[in-house]
Each structure stands twice: as C-alpha cells, then as structure tokens.
Image (cartoon, rainbow, N blue to C red):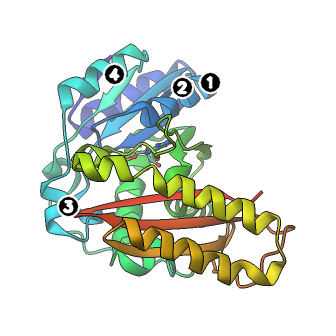
Amino acid sequence: MRIFHKISEIKSEIKNLKKQGKKIAFVPTMGFLHEGHLSLIDEAKKNADIVISSIFVNQKQFNEASDFTNYPSNLEGDIAKLESKKTDILFCPNSSEIYPRPNLINFEIKNLADNLCGATRQNHFQGVVLVVSKLFNIIDPDVAIFGEKDFQQLQIIRRLVSDLNFDIKIIPGAIFREENGLAMSSRNSRLTSDNLNKSPEIYKILSAAKTEILSSKTDKIHEILEKAKIKLSKIFDKIDYLEICDEENLQIVKEFDKNIKSRIFVAVYAGEIRLIDNIPLY
Ligand code: AMP
C-alpha cells in the first residue's frame, strides 16, 4: 500500500492511474479502523480496480471539543488492517494540508439535516460536507462507499453528489455489528467496560420495537417508541433522539406506512460517549 500525505502527490498518482484507465473506489474514514470500515474496503474492491482510503479526523465536524481531542487513533494498526485487505493507497493528510487557511465558503443543508444528528450536533453535517467535497475533488473517485451506520450522512452525501454534479456513484455499506448486535464504532473503544456491556441493548431494543411496529396498527408507533424510550432511559445516561424517519427525506414519520421505506434511528449517551444506530422497518 502506498501512503500519501500531500494533496499534490496523491493527485499526480491518481492522474497516472486514470491515464491507465483504472476505475477508482474511495473509502473515507477518520481512522481507528474496525471490521465495519474494512467491510467498506471489501465493497470498494468489488466495484473498482484501485481502492483508496483516507484517514483524516476532521475537526470541523466535531461539535464538542473533547470528542475531537479524545477521538481514538492508531495509525500503525490502521495501516496493517488496510494492508491486510490489500488496499492500494492510503491518503492521510494533516489538518493544515486540508485546511491551509480558514475557509470562507460554507455549505447550508436544508431539510435532510433538520432532524436526528443534524438537530443536536450543531454544524456537524456542514463540516462533513465540506471535507467530503474537498476529498472528492482531491481523489476524483468513480465510486465512493459510505456506511449505513451513519445513515443521515449517507443520504446527505447522496444529495451533495447530485446537487453539485459530482460524477461519483455512492454505494452504501451495511452496518457491521459485533456478534452481540452492537454496531461497530471507533468510539466503542472509549466505553467503560460497564457501558460496553450495556451497549448491545440498543440493538435489542430497536429490534423489539421493529417487531412490534411491523405487527401492529399504524397509529401505534408513538406508544411503541415511548416504551422503547423508557427502556433505553433505564440503561443509558441520556437519549439524544429515538425517531422513525422516512429513509429518503429523513422527515419524522407520524403514521407508519409499510409502503414507504422508513427506519428507526437512535442516539444515546453511555457516559460521555454518544452511540448511534438505526434499523430498517422492512
Ligand atoms: P468514521 O471513521 O466513523 O468516519 O466512518 C467512516 C465510514 O465507515 C463511514 O462511511 C461510516 O458510516 C462507516 N462505518 C462506521 N462504522 C461502521 C459499521 N459498523 N458498519 C459499516 N460501516 C461503518
């Protein structure tokens, strides 16, 4: 695997690859890689000749300073994992390479960022869209893989690509879970052992709510969600949100309709650590 830190150097490498007619797949990450990230590399491999991943902890998408400073990192371990998956290229720029001066241009995201993480994480998605646009312009991939774990991010990126005419196919990657159901996340490494033991309850509670919703009357979803909220609040320190949203527009669903694809979305705090998950209601 070749590793690049400088934009000019990776750009000239990509120019060469494109001249040879290579199809490029891109998997952006913030590092501290786990099997969820690696499943996206597998997906990338299926869809291109060359797989490029990036590791960049984007300060602009963190709304809490301590979350940024404490974000886990292990570059050596990440490199070994990417090499084990035969990733071709890793791009890991430092912050001043990506943000050489304060940016004066910012994005405004309507509707898709109104609910869920967009409602509680001030400017999070503006930061995501800014860095992803920069990375797309640097890497110029044919396809890019984004995990359904961050479903709202996936939908916003799809819309970014369409609204700004990026010629990039966005491919979703299914949520990769621990055997106990906990969605893998770099932040899981920061859970206390007590909270790590409790965290699989998120998926269990979502799955139970899903079963109930799919087998009950459409107007019962409010009650079912309230019950799930009570269960979650007995286990976790804070519920950020628990909502059913339409998959396409991410607007909150008041009455469940089996013909409209929707998902249950959750964010909870286990101590300081914010955990998110979602499951489809179909
Ligand atoms: P991150 O490093 O958290 O920014 O994530 C980088 C990419 O990996 C994003 O597209 C995430 O949605 C995806 N990802 C993170 N965790 C998982 C998981 N458990 N399963 C599948 N994809 C994931």
Q: Is residue 139 left or right of residue 149?
A: left
Q: CA distance from mark 2 to mark 1?
A: 7 Å
Q: Nearer the viewer, residue 213 or 157?
A: 213
Amino acid type of the residue that numbered disc 1 sits on in the rendered structure: Lys
Label whose residue precedes the other's in the sequence (4 or 2)? 2
Amino acid type of the residue that numbered disc 3 sits on in the rendered structure: Asp
Q: Label 3 belongs to which residue? A: 67
From the image, which quarter does the N terminus lie in? top left
Q: Quadrant of residue 59?
A: bottom left
User: Pointer 2 and pointer 1: residues touching (CB < 8 Å)?
Assistant: yes
- From the viewer's perspective, is the residue at label 3 or at label 2 nearer? 3
Q: CA distance from mark 4 to mark 2?
A: 12 Å
Label whose residue precedes the other's in the sequence (4 or 1)? 1
Amino acid type of the residue that numbered disc 4 sits on in the rendered structure: Lys
The x and y percentages for residue 268 are 39, 67
Q: CA distance from mark 4 to mark 1?
A: 18 Å
Q: Secondary structure at mark 4?
A: helix
- Label 2 CA crowd tier, 10 Å (few <14, some 14–19, many 20+): some
Q: CA distance from mark 1 to mark 3?
A: 34 Å
- From the viewer's perspective, is the residue at label 4 or at label 1 nearer? 4
Q: Label 2 belongs to which residue? A: 42
User: Pointer 3 and pointer 2: residues touching (CB < 8 Å)?
Assistant: no
